[in-house]
C-alpha cells in the first residue's frame, strides 16, 4: 500500500511538469497579445513593443519557459500582468473561497443524493423512485448558470431571504453552493440507485437475508458498503468538476474564487495567473483521484490486495 | 421629425432630469421625482454605497495604462473640469490664463489642497506630471495630445507656466480627462510606477483608496480633508458617504438581479432587455444618458468600387437607423449622423441630420452614375461586368452580427449583395490594418469626439487608426488647422467644417448610432447625477437615505 502511494505521489512531479509545459505553450497560441491588454485601448504600437519587452514576451517561447521554471524553482510564480499583484497572493486569496464553495456543494450533494439513491433503489418503481429520478433527470438537464439566476430571482429578488452576490458571510454561500451542487446531486443519486440495485441482486445479499439478518443490517452493513465503490471513484472526478462548474457559478454570484480568477485571467491574457491556476487545478484533480483510490482500497479489500 | 426628437432628447437643461424621455420607458417620471426629493431633504452623512461595475477595475495609474475605472474619478482631481450644465471648462485644481497668441499657459494652483498622505499640492507636482506625461520612454497613452508642449516651469509654489510650440486648444480637453489626474510624485516614486495604482494611490480626490483586491472588490473611503471640489458642486466639504464599495459582476443578468435583490445600490450597464422591467420596479430608478460614443460602418476607401464616393453615398442612402436602434439596442440609443453626438452642441453640426436620408431611388441613381447597374436582372448590381459581392467584416459579438445582418438586408434593397464574415478580433484587426476588407464595423467611446476626426481620418493614420483608409489632402489640411487653433471656438468651427466634408460629401463611413449609458439606482441613492460631460459621475453630492 505505501509503495503504491509513494509511486503515485512521485508521478505527480513529471505530471505537473508536462502539464505546465502544455499550458505554457497553448495559452500563447490564443490571439490578442497581453501587452495591449495591459496598456489599455489607446496604446500606440511603440508602447506595445516596449510593454511586450517588459513582460519578457519578446523572447522565444522556450527561453520564456526556462526563465519561468527557474523562477518557480525559487518559489516565485511571477506577477499578474493584469493587476500587478503577486500571483501567489491572488491564489491564496481565491483558493479558500473555492474550497469553501466546492466543499459545501459536495457535502450538500452527498447529503441529498445518497439517501435519495438508496431510497429509490429500495422502493424501485414506486412513486418515490419516480419522483427522485425525475428530480435527477431535471437536475442534470439544468445548466448551472440558469439555475444560479433562477435561485437569485426566487430567493434574493422575490423572497429577499438570501443575498444575491458577494462572499461576506455564510449566508452568501448558500445560493451558489446549491447552484453548484445540483448537477452532482442528480448524477450521484442516479449512480447510488443503480449501484444499490446491482448490489441488492448479488448472492451475498440473498445469503444475508437467508441468514435471517434484519433488513436494516442487510442494507447498511452489506449492501451499502459495496454500493459506495463507484461513488467514491466518482468523487475523484467530481473534485475537478467542482472547480470547473464553479467557473460559471462564481461568475454569476461574483464569488471571488479560483474559477472567476481563471476566467478573468484568460480573458485578459494574464499568462502568469492562468499558468499557475491551471497547473494547480491539474495537480488537485490528480490528488483527488489519489485520495479516491486510497478510500477505494479502504472500502474494498480486493483493491488493497491487488495493489500490493 | 428627426430634428425635433434630437432637441427633446438632448436639450442640455433637461439632461439632468432624465435624458431619454423617449428612450427610457418610465424613467423620466421617477428621475424627476428623485431630483425634487434630493432638494427637499437634508443630506445625511454615512453609509457605504455598493456599486456594481460592468468592467473589472484594473490598475489605477493613468500614467502607465489607459484602462479606467469609475473610482479614478473620485480618487484624483485634475487641473480642469467641465460644468455639467453647460459643458464649459472650469477650474478644479487650478485657474488658467492663456496668452493672446495661445502659446503661453499660466496655471495658478489652488491653495490649501493636500494629497491623501497630507503633503500639500504645489506647482512641483504639476510640473512633474507634465514631464511624466510627455516622457518619450513612458507608457502614458496620450503623449501625442501634449506634443505641442515645449517647456514646463514651476515659477513659484502655486504657479506653473507651460509654453507651446504652436497653439493647441485641445490641451484643455486633455487636462480635463481622468487621464490627467494629478498624483503625489513622492508616493509615486516611492512605490514605483508598477505598484502605484495597485498597492496604493495618492491623489487629491474626495475619496482615498482603502482596499483593492483584483477579482473581488475595490473600496474607497471618504477623504475627510477634502474641501476643494469645483464650484458647481453643491457640497463643498468632504463627501457624505463613508465609503464606496465596487464589485465587478461579469454577467449582465446577474447585475440586474443583484440590484433587484437589494445587494447593490447602483448598477452600470444592465442587460438592455432588462431595462424595461427594471424601470417598472418601484424600488429602482433607471437613468440614462447618451454616451460620447458612436457605432459606425467603415468603407474601405482604397478598395474599388468603394474608392468612388458615389458608391459610398449610395450606400449611405440605403441605411435606416431606427430599426437598428430598436432591434440591437432595444431602443436604448440614438440614431447617429455624425461622429459627434448631439450632446456636444458646441461642436455638433446640426445639418448632418439631413445628410443622405433614406432614399432608395436616389441610392440607385448614384450607383448607376458610378456605373453599377443590374444588367443580368438578378436583382443585384454588377461591377465592371462581374457580379459584385462586397465583404463586411464583423467580430463574433452578437450585437455586431445582428448589425451586419440588418446592413445586409438594407443593402440588398438597393441591389448590393453584401457578404458577412465573422472572424475573431485578432484576425479582424489584422485585416483591418492591412486593408483586406470592403466594409468593417467601428466604434469609439471618448468624451472628445473632435479628436476622433484626427485619429480616424488623417491620411498618415492609415494602417493604425484610420480604418476607412481615407486619404484626402483637404481633410488632412483641415485636421492640421484644427490642431493649431488657439481657442475652442476656432477649433469647433473647424470640427464643423470637418463634419460637413466627411459626412456630407466623402462618406468614408456611415455613423449608425450613439448608445446610451444606463444606470440603475436603488431609491435610497440621492444626488448621483450622471452627466454627459463626464464618463464617471461625481460622488460629492451623493448620499444614502
Image (tube, coloured by chain):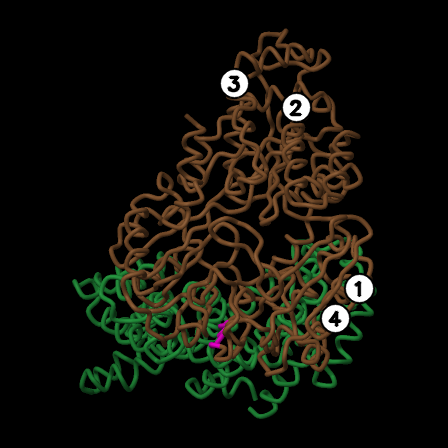
Q: Is residue B335 above or below residue A101?
A: above
Q: Which one is in front in this view, the residue at disc 2 or the one at disc 4? A: 4
**Residue beneath label 4, please?**
B128
> Is disc 1 placed on a helix, strand or loop?
loop
Q: Is residue A181 magenta?
A: no
Marked residue nearer the N-terminal end (2 or 4): 4
The subunit letter for the residue under badge 3 reads B
The subunit letter for the residue under badge 1 reads B
The subunit letter for the residue under badge 2 reads B
Marked residue nearer the N-terminal end (1 or 2): 1
Q: Quadrant of residue A68?
A: bottom right
Q: Nearer the viewer, residue A226 or B495?
A: B495
Q: Quadrant of residue B91?
A: bottom right
Q: Residue furthest bottom?
A: A2
Chain colored brown: B
- Residue B120 in percent (x, y) is at 63, 79
**Residue beneath label 2, please?**
B505
- Residue A78 in percent (x, y) is at 70, 77
Q: Which one is in front in this view, the residue at disc 3 or the one at disc 2? A: 2
Label 2 CA crowd tier, 10 Å (few <14, some 14–19, many 20+): some
Give, as a single range, the part of the protein colored magenta: B216-222
CA gap, disc 1 to disc 4?
10 Å
Respond whether the residues carrying marks 3 and 2 are from the same subunit: yes
- Residue B450 in percent (x, y) is at 64, 42
Amino acid at each position: 500500500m505505501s509503495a503504491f502511494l509513494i509511486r503515485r505521489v512521485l508521478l505527480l512531479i513529471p505530471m505537473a511538469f508536462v502539464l505546465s509545459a502544455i499550458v505554457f505553450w497553448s495559452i500563447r497560441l490564443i490571439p490578442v497579445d497581453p501587452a495591449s491588454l495591459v496598456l489599455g485601448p489607446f496604446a500606440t504600437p511603440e508602447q506595445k513593443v516596449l510593454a511586450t519587452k517588459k513582460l519578457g514576451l519578446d523572447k522565444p517561447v522556450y527561453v520564456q519557459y526556462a526563465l519561468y521554471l527557474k523562477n518557480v524553482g525559487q518559489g516565485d510564480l511571477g506577477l499578474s500582468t493584469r493587476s500587478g499583484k503577486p500571483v501567489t497572493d491572488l491564489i491564496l486569496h481565491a483558493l479558500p473561497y473555492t474550497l469553501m464553495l466546492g466543499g459545501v456543494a459536495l457535502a450538500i450533494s452527498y447529503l441529498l443524493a445518497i439517501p435519495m439513491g438508496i431510497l429509490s433503489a429500495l422502493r424501485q418503481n414506486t412513486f418515490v423512485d419516480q419522483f427522485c429520478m425525475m428530480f435527477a433527470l431535471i437536475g442534470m438537464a439544468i445548466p448551472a448558470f440558469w439555475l444560479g439566476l433562477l435561485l437569485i430571482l426566487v430567493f434574493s429578488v422575490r423572497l429577499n431571504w438570501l443575498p444575491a452576490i458577494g462572499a461576506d458571510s455564510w449566508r452568501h454561500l448558500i445560493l451558489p453552493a446549491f447552484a453548484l451542487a445540483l448537477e452532482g446531486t442528480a448524477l450521484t443519486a442516479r449512480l447510488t440507485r443503480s449501484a444499490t440495485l446491482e448490489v441488492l441482486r448479488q448472492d451475498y445479499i440473498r445469503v444475508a437475508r437467508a441468514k435471517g439478518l434484519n433488513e436494516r443490517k442487510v442494507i447498511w452493513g452489506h449492501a451499502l458498503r459495496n454500493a459506495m465503490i463507484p461513488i467514491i471513484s466518482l468523487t475523484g472526478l467530481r473534485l475537478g468538476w467542482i472547480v470547473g462548474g464553479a467557473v460559471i457559478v462564481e461568475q454569476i454570484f461574483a464569488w471571488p474564487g479560483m474559477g472567476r480568477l481563471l476566467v478573468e485571467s484568460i480573458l485578459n491574457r494574464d499568462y502568469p495567473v492562468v499558468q499557475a491556476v491551471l497547473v494547480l487545478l491539474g495537480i488537485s484533480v490528480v490528488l483527488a483521484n489519489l485520495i479516491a483510490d486510497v478510500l477505494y482500497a479502504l472500502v474494498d479489500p480486493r483493491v488493497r490486495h491487488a495493489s500490493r | 421629425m428627426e430634428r425635433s426628437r434630437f432637441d427633446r432628447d438632448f436639450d442640455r437643461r433637461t439632461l439632468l432630469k432624465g435624458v431619454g424621455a423617449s428612450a427610457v420607458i418610465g424613467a423620466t417620471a421617477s428621475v424627476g421625482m428623485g431630483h425634487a426629493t434630493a432638494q427637499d431633504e437634508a443630506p445625511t452623512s454615512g453609509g457605504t454605497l455598493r456599486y456594481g461595475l460592468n468592467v473589472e477595475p484594473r490598475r489605477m495609474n493613468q500614467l502607465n495604462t489607459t484602462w479606467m475605472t469609475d473610482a479614478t474619478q473620485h480618487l484624483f482631481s485634475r487641473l480642469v473640469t467641465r460644468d455639467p450644465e453647460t459643458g464649459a471648462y472650469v477650474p478644479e485644481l487650478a485657474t488658467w490664463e492663456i496668452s493672446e497668441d495661445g502659446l503661453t499657459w499660466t496655471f495658478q494652483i489652488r491653495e490649501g489642497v493636500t494629497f491623501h498622505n497630507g503633503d500639500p499640492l504645489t506647482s512641483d507636482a504639476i510640473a512633474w506630471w507634465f514631464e511624466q506625461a510627455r516622457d518619450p520612454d513612458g507608457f502614458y497613452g496620450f503623449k501625442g495630445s501634449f506634443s505641442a508642449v515645449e517647456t514646463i516651469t514651476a515659477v513659484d509654489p502655486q504657479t506653473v507656466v507651460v509654453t507651446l510650440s504652436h497653439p493647441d486648444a485641445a490641451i484643455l480637453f486633455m487636462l480635463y480627462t481622468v487621464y490627467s489626474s494629478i498624483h503625489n510624485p513622492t508616493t509615486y516614486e516611492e512605490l514605483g510606477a508598477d505598484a502605484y495604482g495597485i498597492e496604493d494611490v495618492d491623489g487629491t480626490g474626495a475619496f482615498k483608496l482603502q482596499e483593492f483586491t483584483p477579482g473581488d472588490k475595490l473600496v474607497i473611503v471618504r477623504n475627510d480633508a477634502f474641501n476643494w471640489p469645483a464650484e458647481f458642486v453643491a457640497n463643498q466639504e468632504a463627501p457624505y458617504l463613508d465609503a464606496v464599495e465596487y464589485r465587478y459582476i461579469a454577467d449582465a443578468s446577474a447585475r440586474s438581479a443583484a440590484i433587484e435583490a437589494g445587494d447593490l445600490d447602483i448598477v452600470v450597464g444592465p442587460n438592455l432587455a432588462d431595462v424595461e422591467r427594471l424601470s417598472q420596479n418601484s424600488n429602482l430608478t433607471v437613468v440614462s444618458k447618451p454616451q460620447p460614443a458612436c457605432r459606425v460602418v467603415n468603407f474601405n476607401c482604397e478598395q474599388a468600387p468603394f474608392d468612388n464616393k458615389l458608391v459610398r453615398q449610395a450606400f449611405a442612402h440605403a441605411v435606416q437607423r431606427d430599426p437598428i436602434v430598436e432591434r440591437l439596442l432595444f431602443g436604448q440609443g440614438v440614431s447617429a449622423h455624425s461622429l459627434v453626438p448631439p450632446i456636444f452642441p458646441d461642436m455638433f453640426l446640426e445639418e448632418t441630420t439631413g445628410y443622405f436620408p433614406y432614399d432608395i431611388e436616389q441610392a440607385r441613381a448614384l450607383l448607376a452614375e458610378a456605373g453599377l447597374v443590374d444588367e443580368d436582372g438578378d436583382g443585384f448590381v454588377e461591377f465592371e461586368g462581374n457580379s459584385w459581392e462586397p465583404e463586411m467584416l464583423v467580430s463574433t459579438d452578437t450585437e455586431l452580427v445582428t448589425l451586419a445582418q440588418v446592413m445586409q438586408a438594407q443593402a440588398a434593397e438597393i441591389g448590393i449583395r453584401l457578404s458577412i464574415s465573422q472572424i475573431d478580433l485578432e484576425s479582424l484587426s489584422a485585416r483591418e490594418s492591412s486593408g483586406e476588407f470592403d466594409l468593417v464595423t467601428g466604434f469609439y467611446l471618448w468624451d472628445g469626439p473632435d479628436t476622433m476626426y484626427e485619429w480616424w481620418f488623417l491620411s498618415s493614420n492609415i494602417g493604425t487608426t484610420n480604418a476607412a483608409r481615407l486619404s484626402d489632402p483637404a481633410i488632412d489640411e483641415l485636421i492640421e488647422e484644427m490642431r493649431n487653433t488657439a481657442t475652442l471656438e476656432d477649433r469647433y468651427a473647424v470640427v464643423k467644417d470637418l463634419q460637413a466634408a466627411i459626412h456630407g460629401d466623402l462618406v468614408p463611413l456611415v455613423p449608425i448610432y450613439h448608445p446610451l449609458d444606463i444606470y440603475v439606482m436603488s431609491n435610497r441613492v440621492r444626488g448621483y447625477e450622471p452627466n454627459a460631460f463626464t464618463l464617471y459621475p461625481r460622488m460629492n453630492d451623493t448620499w444614502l437615505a
